[in-house]
Structure formats: C-alpha cells, structure tokens
Image (cartoon, rainbow, N blue to C red):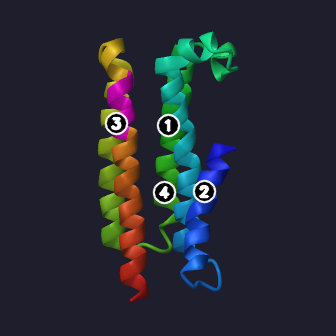
C-alpha cells in the first residue's frame, strides 16, 4: 500500500501545478516511484527483519530467507533499471539515454558488489545507500529533462 501511495504523490503535485492531462514524464516518474519502494523496503527487512518479527509484524521473511530476499531485491532492481531505460526510449534524447545506460550499468555493478560480495554486516547498509542515491539521480534526470523539454 505504501508504494501505491508514494506513486500517487507526484501525480497530485503534477495536477495541482495546473496540468490538464498525463504526459509520459510524469507517468514514468510515478511508476519509477512505485517500483523503487519495494526493494527499498525489502532491504530494510533484510537488515531489521528480526526486530519486525520480535515486534509481531508479519513480513516476507516468513516465506523467504535473507539470501532469497537479496536475490529478489537484485532481480527487482534489474527490472526497474530496465523499465526506466526502456520506457524513456521514446521520450528521452540520445544523450539522456546514454546517461541512463551508464548510470544503470554503474549502479547494477556497485549494487551487486554491495549486496553479494561485501561482508554481510556492511553490504545491506551500502546497498541501501546505493539504491537511494540511484533513485535520486534517476528522478532528477527525469524531472530535469521534462522541465527542459517543456520550456
């Protein structure tokens, strides 16, 4: 439910600013916000799952162990980065697509290293920082390009 609520907020702002209809940029931005929130939360569960369990909250860790959840997070991230690149291919210029390809490849490489190759105590914190940093950069690219394209 939180992912859906998080995806609606940009739409509310978009229409509050006077938009009359949906455009591709706000649609990509909202879907990206929706997709980003799942691995964001799952990484929190990987790190603090036992505390959620001790507090009596049901989690996905009841069905998946931490290792499987890490693979789910990585697979979701691959899908999200592919979505961002493929969905923007008709909207973004060749320069922006090149920037997104480079950003995606660097992010996937660093995220894989953080999630699977670092010491377990260090990896989740670094992976969490990387996913948030990547999402901020991706959102800034979408917003900046949509503003420049509209002016």
* Image point (42%, 72%), residue name: 92
Q: Quadrant of residue 111?
A: top left
Label whose residue precedes the other's in the sequence (2 or 3): 2
State the extent of the magenta-drawn residues as a range: 124-130
Q: Secondary structure at mark 2?
A: helix
Of the image marks 3 and 4, the number of the one nearer the N terminus: 4
Q: Is residue 69 magenta?
A: no
Q: Which residue is mark 4?
A: 84
Q: Residue at x 59, y 61 (%)?
A: 9
Relative depth, front residue between 94 and 113: 113
Residue 113's x, y, as percent?
32, 26
In the picture, the disc for residue 40 is: 1
Helix, strand or loop for the magenta stretch, by majority: helix
Q: Nearer the viewer, mark 2 or mark 4?
A: 2
Query: Residues at badges 2 and 3 in contact (C-beta under 8 Å)?
Result: no
- Quick check: can you spot residue 58? yes
Foreground of the two, 62 or 92: 62
Which residue in the structure is indicated by mark 3? Answer: 129
Q: Earlier in the sequence, mark 2 or mark 1?
A: 2
The residues bearing labels 2 and 1 have C-alpha atoms spaced at a distance of 14 Å
Give percent across and percent down for residue 150: 43, 86
Dot 2 alpha-carbon crowd within 10 angstroms: few under 14, some 14 to 19, many 20 or more: many
Pinpoint residue 128: horizontal percent, then vertical percent.
39, 33
Residue at point 42%, 66% (across, down): 142
Q: Disc 3 to disc 4, how far (Cα)?
A: 19 Å
Say whether residue 93 is visible: no
Residue in the image at 49% along x and 27% along y:
44
User: Where 151 falls versus 3 (above or below)?
Assistant: below
């Amino acid at each position: 439910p939180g992912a859906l609520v998080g995806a609606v907020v940009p739409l509310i702002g978009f229409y509050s600013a006077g938009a009359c209809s949906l455009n591709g940029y706000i649609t990509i931005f909202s879907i990206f916000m929706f997709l980003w929130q799942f691995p964001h939360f799952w990484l929190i569960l990987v790190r603090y799952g036992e505390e959620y369990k001790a507090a009596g909250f049901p989690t996905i860790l009841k069905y998946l162990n931490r290792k499987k959840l890490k693979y789910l997070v990585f697979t979701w991230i691959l899908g999200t980065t592919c979505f961002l690149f493929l969905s923007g291919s008709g909207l973004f210029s060749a320069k922006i697509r090149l920037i997104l390809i480079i950003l995606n490849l660097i992010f996937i490489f660093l995220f894989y290293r953080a999630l699977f190759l670092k010491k377990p105590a260090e990896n989740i914190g670094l992976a969490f920082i990387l996913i948030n940093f990547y999402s901020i950069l991706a959102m800034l690219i979408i917003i900046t390009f949509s503003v420049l394209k509209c002016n």
